[in-house]
Image (spheres, rainbow, N blue to C red):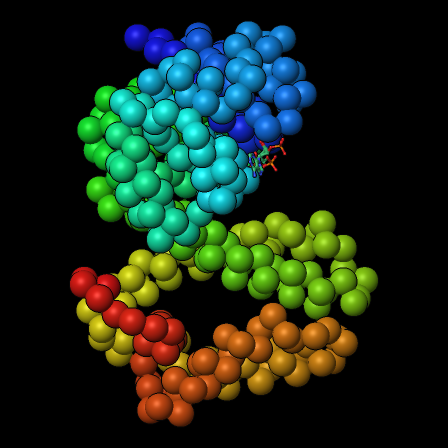
Amino acid sequence: SRIPLTVLGAGAMGAALVRAWLAAGHPVTVWNRTPARAEALAAEGAAVARTAAEAVAASRLVIVCLLDDASVGEALDGADLAGRDLVNLTTGTPAQGRARAAWAAARGARFVDAGIMAVPPMIGDPDSGAYVFYSGSSALFEEHRDTLAVPAGTHWAGEDPGFAALHDVALLSAMTGMFAGVLHAFALIRAEDIAPKDFAPLLSGWLTAMTPAVHKAAEQIQSGDYGKDVVSNLAMQVAGNATLLRTAEEQGVSAELLAPYMALTERRLADGHGDEDISGVVELLGRRHGPG
Ligand code: NDP
């Protein structure tokens, strides 16, 4: 049941994946553009291929974890993919995932795209919470699910090969906003004699306490009814913006991380939605389709 597999890419993430599969007893063939990084893994039991084409020929299951979508096309140019099961763990956009799926199908390979929700030290540690979104060929995914579950948990995102990337990037985008807020908060307090390390548990606790708001926002966004069960209405929150901005000014901190979001809340208020929830701002961001 420990099937052999090939990994293209021995960067920080690729190497962590290789180590996890080796530790679980899978024979692993690895290729990396810069040979030294692959050779470091040979000492740990990996077979090193000289070319990507040779690595692809070594195993039916081929895992790709390179820098970006362009490097995937470059590395696999000239490799014979007929009959291969290609799993692309390279971060990309939904459109890149769909295009890569069509590209693989034209070359006779089954394909799933993937998005890794982890950093390399979490890989291979079942308690880390690491998991990977997969989408595309459900036949490939079902056949290799146990092998794919070795480095990290698996989350099936659907047959649309763009959905793994879409889920991945949506979560990363939310994280981006959260980190922006976190940095702004630290900037405010570090202007005084408050140690960031003492403040950190308060910040972490507050963000955790606020996360259930995600579920209420989901309900409102799905129904399109932003006026239901409103606890903190938009007009009140926009009034609160002024306090946040004045405090930034008092502390000598730039408010540029907050400004674009606040501008949207003000536009939504001006559109007459002051008694609704702030989640209605989503209507200013773009298209609406299907159930959401
Ligand atoms: P690294 O920068 O450590 O490694 C990049 C890899 O891509 C190397 O193997 C590099 O080869 C290879 N590469 C770059 N360009 C080309 C090219 N044109 N042709 C062939 N190979 C190329 O990145 P990571 O390993 O950290 O990341 C790999 C993927 O994993 C990315 O898509 C990243 O977004 C994703 N990921 C990474 C996470 C992380 O925290 N590290 C978290 C989640 C996802 P060479 O050694 O020759 O330069």
Query: Which residue occupies 38% across, 38% down?
Result: 114
* Image quadrant in which you'd find residue 252: bottom right
Q: Quadrant of ligand 1?
A: top right
Query: Which residue occupies 45% across, 22% down?
Result: 53
Q: Is residue 116 above or below residue 56?
A: below
Query: Which residue occupies 34% across, 73% down?
Result: 286
| Residue 179 pos. (x, y %) | 58, 57
Query: Which residue occupies 49% across, 24% down?
Result: 52
* Image quadrant in which you'd find residue 86: top left
Q: Nearer the viewer, residue 189 or 271?
A: 271
| Residue 250 pos. (x, y %) | 74, 80
Q: Is residue 64 left or right of residue 215?
A: right
- Total marks drawn? 0
Question: Where's the N terminus, which quadrant?
Answer: top left
Q: Is residue 188 visible in the rendered structure shown here? A: yes
Q: Is residue 4 above or below residue 96?
A: above
Q: Nearer the viewer, residue 284 or 12?
A: 12
Q: Nearer the viewer, residue 15 or 129?
A: 15
Question: Where's the C terminus, which quadrant?
Answer: bottom left
Q: Is residue 261 above or below residue 40?
A: below
Q: Is residue 125 visible in the rendered structure shown here? A: no
Farthest front residue in view: 78
| Residue 34 pos. (x, y %) | 64, 27
* Image quadrant in which you'd find residue 276: bottom left
Q: Nearer the viewer, residue 137 or 218?
A: 137
| Residue 238 pos. (x, y %) | 48, 83
